[in-house]
């Protein structure tokens, strides 16, 4: 199964990807997490991406497409994967098609901008494994500590309100057209994402014909 999760920043893509990983036993590939690893290691790609990421803009397609191609060629992707945060432009979707990916379904998690802004202020992410939590809706077992790997939790700079507004505007302008691209192909599933996490998970599983 090859799946794409599309949604505004803070729509819950990462959280729902984790539920799908458990169910399907395939890896989730988050281009945002891969970029943050490059930033942390100070690689050339990380340095090129830093300014875009800090301002909430998209990293240029060429850099992202090469990075994704390298990741998808790894053996753990042979049985399928979940893409979280890619494609974010129609050019990226076309490049994925050019790689012969053969995507089965695209799940669009639909949300409301003002609710996203409220949600993002409580988001915390594990510095070591990238797992995401929320101070109100998805608390870690121990404050400030990842329940999965014990790593430290932190608030991403790009989760600040001003940056979130800029990222939402980028989403509407550049990523919304990606939905139309997959709608034309007849593989887009629109899911109402304005509910508690388990409710949204059930909606996604039902739409994909998976039992919980
Ligand atoms: P995310 O963790 O998916 O919200 O991504 C964080 C930031 O990484 C985004 O705001 C972009 O600057 C960059 N980024 C992640 N994925 C992509 C992508 N597919 N295309 C361009 N930029 C990306």
Image: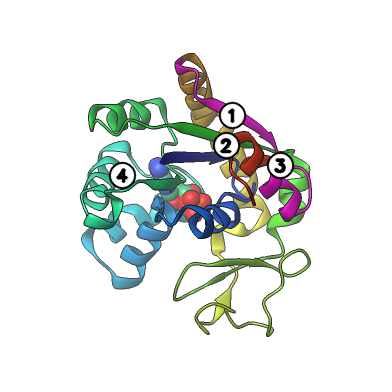
- Mark 4 residue's CB less than 8 Å from ligand 1: yes
Q: Is residue 201 magenta?
A: yes
| Rendered image quadrant of residue 111 | top right
| Residue at the spot 53% in from the left edge and 52% down from the top edge | 20
**Mark 3 highlights which residue?**
193
Q: Is residue 7 above or below residue 89?
A: below
Circle 3 packing at 10 Å, graded few (<14), some (14-19), many (20+), is: many
Q: Which residues are magenta?
A: 185-202
Residue 55 appears in view? no
Chain-order first, disc 2 or disc 4: 4
- Left or right of 35 in this view: 84: right
User: In the image, which disc is placed on residue 189?
Assistant: 1
Cα distance, mark 3 to mark 2?
Answer: 15 Å
Chain-order first, disc 4 or disc 1: 4
Q: CB under 8 Å between callouts 2 and 1?
A: yes
Q: CB under 8 Å between callouts 3 and 1?
A: no
The residue most toward the top is: 184
Cα distance, mark 4 to mark 3?
Answer: 26 Å
Residue at disc 4, secondary structure: helix
User: In the image, which disc is placed on residue 208?
Assistant: 2
Cα distance, mark 2 to mark 1?
Answer: 9 Å
Circle 2 packing at 10 Å, graded few (<14), some (14-19), many (20+), is: some
Q: CB under 8 Å between callouts 4 and 3?
A: no
Q: Is residue 146 above or below residue 51?
A: below
Nearer to us in this view, 187 or 117: 187
Task: Name the mark nearer the viewer: 3 or 1.
Answer: 1
Cα distance, mark 2 to mark 4?
Answer: 28 Å
């Amino acid at each position: 199964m090859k799946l794409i999760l599309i949604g505004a920043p803070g729509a819950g893509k990462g959280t729902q990807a984790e539920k799908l990983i458990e169910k399907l036993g395939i890896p989730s590939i988050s281009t945002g997490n891969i970029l943050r690893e490059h930033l942390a290691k100070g690689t050339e790609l990380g340095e090129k991406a830093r300014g875009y990421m800090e301002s909430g803009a998209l990293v240029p397609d060429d850099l992202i497409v090469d990075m994704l191609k390298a990741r998808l060629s790894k053996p753990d992707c042979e049985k399928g994967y979940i893409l979280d945060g890619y494609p974010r432009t129609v050019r990226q979707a076309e490049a994925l098609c050019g790689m012969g990916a053969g995507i089965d379904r695209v799940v669009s998690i639909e949300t409301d901008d003002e609710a996203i802004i409220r949600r993002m202020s409580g988001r915390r992410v594990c510095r070591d494994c990238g797992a995401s939590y929320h101070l109100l809706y998805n608390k870690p077992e121990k404050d400030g500590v990842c329940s999965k790997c014990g790593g430290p939790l932190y608030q991403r700079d790009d989760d600040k309100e001003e940056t979130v507004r800029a990222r939402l505007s980028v989403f509407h302008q550049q990523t919304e057209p990606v939905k139309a691209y997959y709608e034309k192909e007849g593989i887009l599933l629109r899911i109402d994402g304005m509910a508690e996490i388990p409710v949204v998970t059930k909606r996604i599983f039902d739409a994909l014909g998976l039992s919980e």
